[in-house]
Amino acid sequence: MKRSQINRIIDESLEFCRRMNFHLPPFALWSPQDWATRGHEYDEIRDNMLGWDVIDFGLGKFEEVGCVLFTIRNGNQRIAQYKKPYCEKLLIVAQNQVTPYHFHFAKMEDIINRAGGNLMVQVYNADENEQLADTPVEVNTDGYVRTVDAGTVICLTPGESITLPPYQYHKFWAEGGAVLCGEVSMVNDDTVDNRFLEELERYPVLEEDEPARYLLCNEYPPAP
């Protein structure tokens, strides 16, 4: 992805949050110059990869396959000083923009439609070879538990949520307009806990065609 594209996407995401009346923490607006002056008092942000994450999965077609994430809070199972056993993220899903099939080995999460259009979530169990199983899937939406056929698409209207346990494949996209989603989960570690059905890149390879206005969560410099 080009840096100019990242800059534009984050600007548009900030404007979308303003329209949805969702307020992000101050560090969402920090520039690379700001980060260069931030000391060890902000190491929790660095170590736990809080902040912006713009994903195109290495496919180069972000408008079709991709997602914007902002990690608001997170623990860290590898650094003992961080005691939080939970994570919260914001996700912005554009109209018809797909996040491909994946599951998590350890993390259970709730995906919440906070505002906007409808979030469509397709679910499968994983089989013993980590492929899509044809077995019935147990679905929990806001405490309503039922069993559905493999590949069923669940429509989450604004305010609704779905609980996704480990080893449950899910793919999602927005219909009827962009969706502001929340994610509430156990501690998140994207370096080891994601299993995508297809081999995909987790973080974008960037072409620096203009100066960065913001840093992504994997770009923070060490404290001065």
Image (cartoon, rainbow, N blue to C red):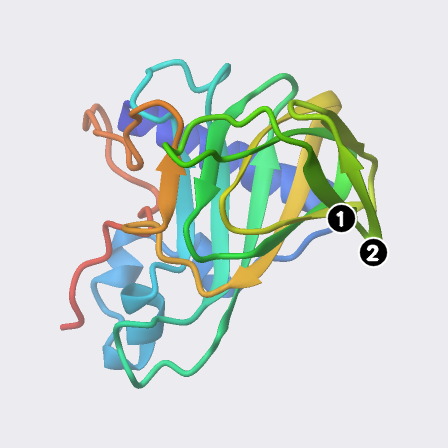
Question: Disc 2 versus disc 1: distance between alpha carbons?
Answer: 6 Å
Do residues under tags 2 and 1 come within 8 Å of each other at their CB atoms?
yes
The quadrant in which the N terminus is found is top left
Q: Which mark is residue 127?
A: none
Residue indicated by mark 1: 140
Amino acid type shown at disc 2: Gly
Q: Amino acid at mark 1?
A: Asn
Horizontal and vertical percent position of residue 156: 79, 36
Task: Answer with left or right where residue 180 lies relative to residue 98.
Answer: right
Is residue 118 something that shows in the picture? no
* Identity of the residue drawn at 50% across and 26% down: 132
Q: How packed is label 1: few (under 14 Cα within 10 Å), some, or many (20 or more)? A: some
Q: Nearer the viewer, residue 7 or 95?
A: 95
Which quarter of the rendering shows the C terminus? bottom left
Q: Quadrant of residue 12?
A: top right
Percent from the top left, x then y, of residue 168? 55, 41
Task: State whether residue 192 is above or below residue 209.
Answer: below
Residue at 65% across, 22% down: 151
Q: Residue 180: tell me if it is visible.
A: yes
Residue assigned mark 2: 143
- Name the spot of residue 127 as percent of width and height, x first: 46, 33
What residue sits 82% from the left and 53% below the top?
142
Q: Position of residue 103 (x, y in %)?
A: 47, 40
- Left or right of 102: which side holds 6? left
Residue at x-position 29% and y-position 25%: 199
- Determine whether 4 is above or below 11 in the image: above
| SS of the residue under disc 2 | loop
